Image (cartoon, rainbow, N blue to C red):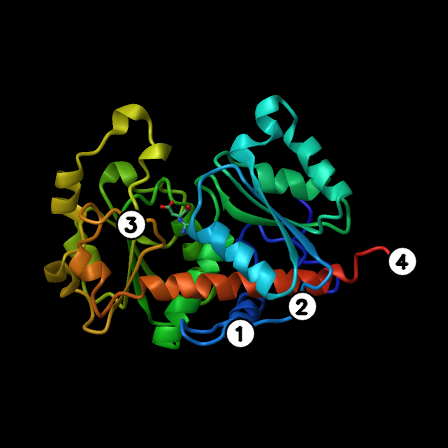
Amino acid sequence: MRAQIDSAGGLRHLVTLEGLSRETLLSLLDRAENYRRIPGQPAYEGRELAGVTVSNLFFEPSTRTRASFDLAARRLGAHVLNMDMQSSSRVKGETMLDTVYTLEAMNTDVFVIRDTEAGLPEFLIDHVAPHVSVISAGEAHCSHPTQGLLDVLTIRTHKRRFEGLKVVIVGDIRHSRVARSTAQALTTLGVTDLRLVGPESLLPDENEFRGAQRFTRIEDGLADADVVMMLRIQKERMAVDASLDDAAYFRDFGLTPARLRLAAPNAIVMHPGPMNRGIEIDSRVADGPQSVIREQVNNGVAVRMAVLAAIAATLTRHRLPL
Ligand code: NCD
């Protein structure tokens, strides 16, 4: 795969957080803080993406990620094309690459792409023109870099530090691109106490998430945690026979107010969405005082603005002269 960082140190593409330096991550978080506006404040409006065309290609359903990439690009002045790839020419037999070349011919500068299968973002990085950038908006179970960034931004806002934090991720970690990207970012930023909780069948392989502790009892993983991150059970990524009983899952792993009391008193509760209320999380927790779930959504727009702006700044070095 071509490098995500260009020779001058600028962000060129973003398909994984793996290998990105602490400095790169922190500068994206700082940039995002500058763009962040809480609901009720006027949204940031800028021209950082003036003259830039962003094409969003989503081969998989998405609410938060898609809406926030769209808003992020528009608030920075981009032209935005939202392609619903479930009804696009791919269904008519056009190859993915032909679709991309078609949109490149219409002066697309940045492709934002989500796919159910692994490998497409990396493949595109190797095939797009030298002045075009690729951002992953979720790649199979492998990677979801902007979600990882918005998660660590949310944690930094509340905890002001990464060193010494106890972070627990609970749920379907095996199928979660969110857990992979967020864990990579946390590790790079200095978190050493990372715990993974779930039934054996939903924990990742031993060679993944190196350094993390694994628990099959939620009570053990929650003890004194500063950050509790709940994940959705992703039935669409499981083999049909891996059907889980929702009530039994809630009984064994659901985050209830009583269980949350095992964590540190000021622990924050996170969830990337979409939530299955009553399966992985009790509504009293999801809507309770420790929940930062809607702040994550707010940070998602700011982080996507930061990534797009960083890439647009790099792009100016790679574009053709008039
Ligand atoms: C997640 C995703 O699609 O990877 N959602 C999101 O992007 N906010 C998590 C999920 O689908 O459970």
Residue at horizontal 54%, vertical 51%? Answer: 16
N-term-proximal mark, 4 vs 2: 2
Residue at horizontal 59%, vertical 53%? Answer: 14
Secondary structure under tag 1 reads: helix
Give the Cα distance between marks 4 and 2: 19 Å
Mark 4 closeness class: few <14, some 14–19, many ≥20 residues within 10 Å: few
Q: Mark 4 and 3 residues: CB-CB less than 8 Å, in contact?
A: no
Secondary structure under tag 3 reads: loop
Q: Does the residue labelled 2 lie within 8 Å of ligand 1?
A: no
Q: Which mark is residue 30?
A: 1
Q: Residue 48 carries which label?
A: 2
Mark 1 or 3, closer to the camera: 3
Give the Cα distance between marks 4 and 1: 33 Å
**Rendered position, 125 above or below 21:** above
Q: Residue 275 carries which label?
A: 3
Q: Which mark is residue 322?
A: 4
- Residue 125: x and y, percent? 67, 44
N-term-proximal mark, 4 vs 3: 3
- Residue 20: x and y, percent? 57, 59
N-term-proximal mark, 1 vs 3: 1
Secondary structure under tag 2 reads: loop
